[in-house]
Amino acid sequence: MPIRVRALGTSETPPRRVARWLARATALAGVAWSAVASAQPAPTASTEQPSPAPEAVPEDAAENEPSGAEPAPGTPAGEAVEHVVARDGDDASTEEEGTDDEDEVPTLELKYGAKVQTDIRFRMEEMQTGGYYNRLVLKKGVERNLNLVGGKLEVKYGKVSAVVDMDLALAGYRMELESFRDLGDQAKVDPFWFDVRQAYLQVSDLFVKGLDLRVGQQIIAWGVGDQFNPTNNLNSPNIEDPLLFGRQLGNVMVRLDYWFTPEWSHSLVVVPLFKPAILPSSAYLGLTAVDRLPFEDAALRWRVGAEQAAAAGKVLGHPTIVGSATPVAPEPAFDNIQVGYRLAGTVLGQDVALSYYYGRSPVPLPYANHTHQDPTPTCNPDDPTQCTQGLLVTDVSLTYPRMHVYGLNVAGEIPLGDEAKALGYRFEGALVVPQRSTLKITQDALPLALPQPAGEYDYDDDGRPGGPEPVVVDSTPFLKWTLGLDYGIGDHLFINLQWVHGFVDEFGAGDALGMSDKEAVRESGVLSDAVTTLFDCALNRDGTHCAREVLRPRIADYLVLGVDVHMFQQHGLLRLFTIWDLDGYTEEFWNPLASGGAGERVRVHHSLFSKEGFSAVLFPQFSYNFGNGLELAAGALLQLGGSTCHATDEEIAANDDECPAVLRTANYTKFGDPATGGSVFFTRGSFNF
């Protein structure tokens, strides 16, 4: 019996292969998590193309293949290399796959690949958030020193196959050592971990031809967009590493596929246990953003914002901080099982699919806040005369709301004539129907200068605690989509363009083209002085005349543009990948001179092209493939954000009509937010075989 050993290769066309590379190295950072108050961090990389062969390599093989692997000399690019080992006196032979001969003797097939990779990164600037009483700092310098040993093995015997895809990560010293005792903790001094992406068993043609069953740790990618996949919900995103944006977490699933024609299939997936998203390591900086109030009710936000500002003022001297943020994952119960269904096939040579998912949002939202007083004074180490009288400490509980997702995927190519290459296109859209989520606010007795009794917050201001809990996300359906085009010019230039409506961390009512009035708070405060804030707004329980907010759509739009330039006989690759935040930001505040001096709240929009509205990611990189699986790369991930000035007219005039740098902040922008981790420079070396 022959043992057939096949080295992992790729069957993608050159443009798709280039696009996959582009997607894999996509540099997005972008999920600035503000769970405290707002629950706010190559094309075809994750495409699963319908195939008439039920036993084809899994749809995520392209993502998991060792990058940079090359075929053996003399093998056409893109084709797999088969090594056949004779056994028990049989003649070595290579059998044609896809045969329908029921009498064929099963053969043992091995497909394998491995990689060794080292990654060193340097943070280019210090990132910090909060005041002197709750400051969090992300220092500049070495941000990451990661060494990776990984491999993938597929064993197949007849109709049964097993796949294992895992990495062993060895991190260089980067953890904080808090005591001498930590020097005896190997996990802190020399940390390492296993990342088991996939480990499953599959049986093809179960009971009837075309019926496949797969059980175990899996990654199921149904989307066709490049790294932005609103229909990929069966696996939660792993957004800890911005350079690997689009990566998903493996999860234990049961999957059943039935190919009822050579081109059309049904897929049913059951996910017993929910696994939440892994957030960026810098996301904890978002815990200081207590001003990003998540309520949909604007009047309630203004009132609470004015009360927070009054409590932090000189009279009361108790700023609000977050003491803890505790995620509460769904229990392992039958009611919390996730399910997905897909119908996929081809129409006139174009790939189409309809899908449905019932499960939960992978990024948490706050559902309960409880506040208590810490009467211990805190002083500014840079100015000992500046002190608090205590702190209002809020403990936040987070949940993962349920949702229904109805998906549509279409992908293919548009011929442009005999002399021109085809234009690749893909559309991935999702209609999301979320569970209505509210936030319960409670407190201990707060013996301030203006005492507050223990109990629930008076939401409707009727003089009695409680009332209808404020809505964080209502049940209004909203859309997310990715619309992309890719085109190759000659053998040296590849262009990838995408319109993305909805980032991975964006959730809640939104509508196409910014027509929804549902907005997310990115920054808030008051423009009034301490006395006015206390007596005119906080005590009157109406922050209309005091509150200032910076807002943006809950579901925003982004332009994603990638350009690859191949050089040095295809060994060198110069890549520039960018993401532009298109919607800008809106500043809303009370203008006492508006309406003929009667005063009203006004809105000022800051576009993408203004200092206050600019936010983008730039990802330049150069890599060189030395052949035989060895590749070296260097580049930078630049996360840029606009800024707003908090200086008075007198301070600006004293600074030659410029805003003083210390009074200009960029915390509210999508990519300028410190919680995204800031800009980094990286070098990477990898060897694949």
Image: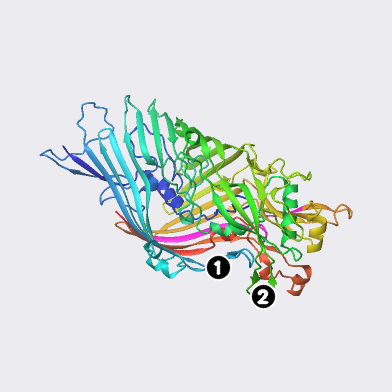
Q: Are marks 1 and 2 in contact (CB under 8 Å)?
A: no
Q: Between disc 1 and disc 2, whose residue precedes? A: 1
Q: Which residue is mark 1?
A: 126
Residue closer to the observer: 302 or 98: 302
How crowded pointer 1 is (Cα within 10 Å; few <14, some 14-19, many 20+) is rated as some
Residue closer to the observer: 516 or 353: 516
Q: Which residues are magenta?
A: 603-623
When the figure is inspected, residue 632 is found, relative to residue 655, above or below; the finding is above
Quadrant position of residue 311: bottom right
Residue closer to the observer: 633 or 268: 268
When the figure is inspected, residue 495 is found, relative to residue 381, above or below; the finding is above
Q: CA distance from mark 1 to mark 2?
A: 24 Å
Q: The N terminus is located in which quarter?
A: top left
Q: At which x and y percent is residue 517? A: 70, 43
Q: Is residue 192 left or right of residue 427?
A: left
How crowded pointer 2 is (Cα within 10 Å; few <14, some 14-19, many 20+) is rated as few
Q: Is residue 146 left or right of residue 102?
A: right
Q: In the rendered structure, find residue 384 and report the number of the disc placed on it.
A: 2
Most frequent secondary structure within the magenta stretch: strand
Residue 215 appears in the rendering = yes
Q: Residue at x 50, y 64 (%)?
A: 680
Task: Tell me the kind of residue under disc 2.
Answer: Pro
Q: At which x and y percent is residue 654? A: 76, 74
Q: Secondary structure at mark 2?
A: strand
Question: Is 181 part of what is drawn in magenta?
Answer: no
Question: Is 620 part of what is drawn in magenta?
Answer: yes
Quadrant position of residue 199: top left
Q: Secondary structure at mark 1?
A: loop
Q: At which x and y percent is residue 344? A: 45, 31
